[in-house]
Amino acid sequence: METKEFFRSYLERLRPGKSGDLMPQFERYLALMLEINATINLVSRKMPPEAYWTQHFLDSLRPLECLDIKELRLLDFGSGGGLPGIPLKLLEPDSRFDLLDSTAKKVRALEEMIQSLGLRRVNCLCHRLEDYACLPRHPLYDVIVCRAVSIEDRYLEPLSKLLKPEGFLLLYKSHNLEDIAKLEKELLLEHDDPVLGLRRIFRIKRGALRPVLGKAKKS
């Protein structure tokens, strides 16, 4: 099965009867990413366009298999090309998303894509995480999603500051767990399939985001 059709069938399982409405939005998003990525490096240019359907879009939607984020406020930390924030927003239009990246040209690209896709209740923010968490009136989030950023010790306090008391960090992981080895975490989802390989979704509650003492050993 081609990757696009594989993604379409996945959408239909997640949102029965809605894949016909959602696919044109993802097709538009793919076209925008490919156009912008030719001049601004949002994602690796080595990946063929047909692989975006599974490696980027399907992978971004994995948490929806085990979590309900409807009407929540989420921060996409290190959003880059809008992954996973934009795919999640397309399936959960009632949720509110802030897309955070420290690179100005990437944030401008995000703004262009959000406008072109006609998405509402989405903000694109150009800040370092540490600086954003120190703003006097920053919002508090139900969930912070992080798909392609290693969780360094210096991020733990800012992440904690940005979460509501009952909020949590949602991490996309594969084999390498070195950066979260000493953090208390909950494995929500694990898949090992021939299309995407090993993919894991972890939840770390706000109270577990404490500075790590020492370095985790490589397995």
Image (cartoon, rainbow, N blue to C red):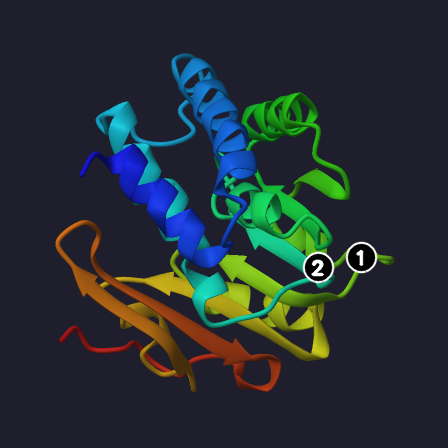
Picture quarter with the C terminus: bottom left
Q: Position of residue 211 (x, y in %)?
A: 50, 79
Q: Position of residue 122 (x, y in %)?
A: 72, 42
User: In the shown orientation, is residue 197 left or right of residue 187?
Assistant: left
In the rendered image, which quarter is residue 1 located in? Answer: top left
Using the image as rendered, state which of residue 4 and residue 38 is in the foreground.
4
Residue type pointed to by label 1: His
- Is residue 30 placed above or below 183 in the rendered structure? above
| Label 1 neighbour load within 10 Å: few <14, some 14-19, many 20+ | few
Which residue is farthest front? 17
Which residue is farthest right? 137
Secondary structure category for the residue under label 2? helix
Pointer 1 residue: 138
Q: Residue at x 42, y 83 (%)?
A: 185
Mark toward the start of the polypeptide (2 vs 1): 2
Using the image as rendered, state which of residue 64 and residue 179 is in the foreground.
64
Given contact means CB atoms under 8 Å apart, are the residues at marks 2 and 1 in contact?
A: yes
Q: Is residue 203 visible?
A: yes
User: In the shown orientation, is residue 59 left or right of residue 93?
Assistant: left
- Is residue 38 placed above or below 187 in the rendered structure? above
Secondary structure category for the residue under label 1? loop
Q: Residue at x 24, y 29 (%)?
A: 47
Pointer 2 residue: 133
Residue type pointed to by label 2: Ala
